[in-house]
Amino acid sequence: MSESRQNTMPLYDYHCPACDNHFELLVRSSTVPTCPKCGSTNLEKCVTAPAAPGKSAAILKAARQRAAAEGHMSNYSQKERSKLLS
């Protein structure tokens, strides 16, 4: 199993028609989803767009450190590479 697949969480959006609550829930295959507001199990699973990967400074720094450890600079822009190589 790939590393990215191992880190994915089965997080789903739901709507509860009984109390009109919209919420996200971590659901494993053996779990019956329940509304946290009213306890109903009669839920509608909502279709949502996946979130784009983050571009935070910490993520970029970690990717650059990993790339440097592997001996390449693929995570640096052309401008940054030219500064580092001069």
Image: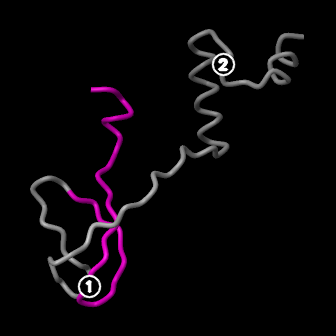
Q: Residues within 10 Å of mark 1 (few under 14, many from 20)?
A: few
Left or right relative to 62: residue 29: left
Please provide the residue range marked out in magenta: 1-27
Q: Residues within 10 Å of mark 2 (few under 14, many from 20)?
A: few
How far apart marks 2 and 1 lie (CA) works out to: 48 Å
Residue at 18 percent across and 83 percent down: it is: 39
* Quadrant in the picture for residue 4: top left
In the displayed structure, 8 sits above or below 44; it is above
Q: Amino acid at mark 2?
A: Ser
* Quadrant in the picture for residue 38: bottom left
Residue at 33 percent across and 26 percent down: it is: 2
Q: Give the quadrant of the C terminus.
A: top right
Residue at 21 percent across and 75 percent down: it is: 43
For numbered disc 2, what is the local secondary structure?
loop
**How far from the left and from the top, in percent, is residue 20?**
33, 87
Would you say residue 3 sits in the magenta stretch?
A: yes
* Residue 28 vs residue 19, the one in the foreground: 19
**How far from the left and from the top, in percent, is residue 11?**
32, 57
**Tag 1 residue:** 17
* Residue 27 vs residue 67, the one in the foreground: 27
**Tag 2 residue:** 74
For numbered disc 1, what is the local secondary structure?
loop
Q: Amino acid at mark 1?
A: Pro
* Quadrant in the picture for residue 82: top right
Query: Between disc 2 and disc 1, whose residue precedes?
Result: 1
